[in-house]
Image: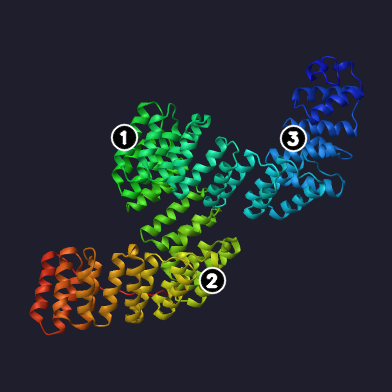
């Protein structure tokens, strides 16, 4: 026999003539090397009928059932063991990890090392490490890593790859990099794990750098490598790198895989190169619904409705049925273009195809009708959704904000909590603007407390939302305390803009300018929103020279960020200081684009304050042409005439308003009385 075991099937033919030791030998093979449920059951039956049952035999049976995937039988036998064995422990740890019960696997590992005083081996540790990664238990993972080093099992690439995956799953990029750097042998799996890990940990640039290192090390990549690299290129919109990867795989066997071709199409779509995406698409010999949907989504994202619909028709002609994701992409296109007519047609098609109850379609429909300002239809779609799914709730909350229904959004949010719907980051991004609009300090403190209790206070973007709420409530002390609580790396352009705007809104112009300077010194590049916030702050605080200096700095260093809002701020700033001629001659007449009604409105408002008829007439002339339905412009011009005693001209403006059919809206004030 030369030391070789006979096949298990041939051995089982003589099962009923075997002795207890032979049965145990066969069962040991089933428990350690040969995965055979039928053989395990036969041996189990033989043991029962022959009375071979012993602690060792039950432990082998438990292990054999575990390896065969029969978790219920395996666990029952394991729990009945008078004395648990190493073989049983190892098999149960593996089984629980593979069947989605990592916590049970870790509990058994701790029990095995503690009470039973058994130790894992190089075949068991990878499953323990995987369980730590799934449960994101970084500290326990580090302890297990230490045990592996102490046991001398770290040398193999399989163990190293398991550790890489665990550290990346736990978000410890430094830990993974250290393991990777110390690996004596790096396989393609090692490189793939690092590339995928960096990408999924929001570091796409590092993922591409690892890929470059892989290419330089001459390790042969596989399709998994490409499927990790291309999404990183798309995410970064790094077209050059994407083209380079395309060239590398063009003549390789992996290019024939549909998944790789789909990833190439997706990369070009995300890089905004529909022409190249279409070239890859047209060359494909095989296309699935993912291929078609990716290209349709590309056309939809670039607002090419004709291209998206034409491809959808071609897709159906070729016998590929659009799925829920395809329809959601088309509905998103309609929402962005405010095309409710086409959106309703697609809604009808979804009803006929019985896919209107899919959560992606429901969410897209809610968003469509909300953005088209047909909110009653959003509510109608929402009323038919499952009230236990988070995404439709997020969509309806965002829809409320879009339609200026902040109070309704808060009421819906309270109902969402009563339904015990799980909240996520998107929920808070949808609802926090409602609290900012309401600017109610009591509500702000209540929602702040709830965010702390629910653990979302650790999210920087949610903290930024709270800063905005407190700023709009006028409590700058609370807002600044939250801002100071953010680490330097988490103070992004949004958080800086919010705190700067908060101080500016409440007349603290110098504080806004100081914060702006701190932001620039910290290396955060200002954007158009930040500049608008600081210029508004200067205007409200009467800091004319500071505002003009900032505007000059902006034109010199951030010319690409100049927007109409910035010119409006400067006209308002100069107008408040009664430097109306400068606002008109220097700013408006030298703008690189046509002045908007907001710019002329700022000038007219300043003319009304300073009773400047000449420039007021110029501004009013433009405004009557640009927005003839705005009664405020007629009222302001009439007030300017009245203030200088030109009552006939004031009456003429009032008649102009009557001829257009406009009526001045009555003024109103709102107060909130509690407990009434």
Mark 1: few/some/many CA within 10 Å (<14, 14-19, 20+)? few
Q: Check whether the beta carbons of the residues at disc 3 and disc 2 lie within 8 A of each other.
A: no
Could you tell which of marks 3 and 2 lies nearer the N-terminus? 3
Q: Is residue 664 visible?
A: no
SS under mark 3: helix
Real-space Cα distance between discs 1 and 3? 53 Å
**Vertical comparison of 589 with 18: above or below:** below
Front position among marks 1 and 3: 1
| Badge 3: residue crowd in 10 Å (few <14, some 14–19, many ≥20) | few
Tag 2 residue: 482
66 to 437, vertically: above or below: above
User: Left or right: where does residue 39 sit relative to residue 423?
Assistant: right
x and y, in percent, of residue 276 in the image: 38, 38
Q: Which mark is residue 72?
A: 3
Q: Position of residue 181 (x, y in %)?
A: 67, 49
Residue designated by label 1: 310
């Amino acid at each position: 026999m030369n030391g070789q075991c006979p096949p298990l099937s041939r051995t089982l033919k003589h099962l009923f003539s075997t002795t207890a030791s032979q049965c145990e030998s066969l069962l040991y093979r089933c428990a350690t090397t040969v995965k055979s449920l039928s053989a395990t059951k036969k041996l189990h039956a033989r043991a029962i009928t022959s009375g071979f049952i012993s602690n060792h035999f039950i432990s082998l049976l438990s292990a054999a059932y575990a390896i065969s995937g029969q978790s219920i039988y395996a666990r029952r036998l394991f729990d009945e063991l008078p004395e648990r064995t190493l073989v049983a422990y190892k098999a149960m740890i593996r089984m629980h990890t593979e069947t989605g019960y990592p916590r049970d696997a870790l509990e058994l590992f701790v029990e095995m090392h503690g009470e039973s005083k058994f130790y894992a081996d190089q075949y068991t540790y990878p499953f323990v490490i995987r369980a730590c990664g799934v449960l994101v238990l970084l500290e326990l993972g580090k302890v297990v890593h230490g045990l592996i080093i102490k046991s001398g099992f770290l040398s193999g690439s399989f163990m190293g790859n398991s550790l890489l995956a665990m550290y990346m799953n736990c978000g410890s990029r430094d830990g993974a990099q250290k393991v990777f750097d110390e690996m004596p042998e790096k396989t393609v799996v090692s490189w793939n794990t690092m590339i995928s890990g960096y990408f999924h940990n929001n570091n796409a640039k590092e993922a591409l750098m690892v890929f470059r290192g892989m290419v330089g090390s001459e390790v042969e990549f596989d399709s998994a490598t490409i499927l990790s690299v291309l999404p990183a290129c798309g995410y970064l919109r790094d077209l050059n790198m994407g083209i380079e990867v395309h060239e590398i795989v063009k003549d390789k066997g992996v290019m024939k895989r549909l998944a790789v071709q789909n990833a190439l199409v997706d990369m070009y779509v995300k890089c905004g190169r529909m022409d190249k995406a279409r070239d890859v698409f047209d060359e494909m010999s095989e296309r699935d619904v993912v291929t078609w949907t990716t290209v349709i989504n590309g056309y939809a994202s670039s607002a090419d409705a004709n291209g998206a619909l034409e491809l959808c028709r071609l897709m159906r002609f070729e016998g590929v049925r659009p799925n829920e994701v395809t329809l959601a992409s088309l509905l998103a296109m309609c929402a962005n273009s405010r095309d409710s007519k086409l959106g309703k047609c697609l809604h009808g098609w979804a009803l006929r195809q019985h896919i209107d109850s899919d959560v992606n379609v429901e969410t897209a429909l809610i968003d469509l009708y909300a953005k088209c300002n047909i909110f009653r239809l959003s509510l109608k779609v929402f009323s038919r959704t499952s009230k236990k799914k988070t995404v439709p709730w997020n969509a309806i909350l965002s829809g409320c904000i879009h339609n200026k229904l902040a109070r309704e959004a808060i009421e819906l949010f309270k109902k969402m909590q009563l339904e015990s719907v799980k909240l996520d980051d998107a929920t808070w991004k949808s609802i926090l603007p409602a609290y900012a609009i309401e600017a109610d300090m009591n509500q702000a403190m209540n929602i702040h407390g709830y965010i702390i209790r629910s653990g979302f206070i650790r999210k920087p973007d949610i903290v930024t939302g709270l800063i905005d709420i407190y700023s709009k409530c006028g409590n700058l002390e609370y807002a600044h305390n939250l801002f100071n609580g953010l680490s330097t790396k988490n103070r992004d352009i949004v958080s800086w803009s919010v705190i700067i705007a908060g101080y500016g809104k409440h007349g603290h112009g110098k504080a806004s300018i100081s914060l702006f300077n701190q932001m620039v010194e910290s290396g955060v590049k200002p954007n158009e929103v930040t500049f608008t916030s600081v210029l508004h702050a200067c205007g409200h605080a009467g800091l004319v020279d500071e505002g003009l200096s900032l505007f000059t700095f902006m034109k010199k260093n951030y010319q690409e960020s100049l927007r109409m809002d910035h010119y409006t701020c400067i006209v308002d700033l100069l107008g408040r200081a009664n430097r109306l001629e400068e606002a008109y001659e220097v700013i408006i007449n030298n703008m690189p684009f046509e002045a908007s009604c907001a710019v002329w409105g700022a000038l007219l408002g300043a003319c009304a304050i300073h009773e400047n008829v000449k420039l007021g007439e110029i501004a009013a002339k433009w405004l009557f042409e640009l927005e003839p339905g705005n009664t405020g412009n007629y009222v302001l011009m009439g007030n300017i005439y009245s203030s200088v005693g030109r009552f006939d001209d004031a009456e003429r403006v009032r008649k102009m308003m009557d001829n257009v059919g406009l009526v001045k809206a009555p003024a109103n004030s709102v107060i909130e009385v509690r407990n009434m």
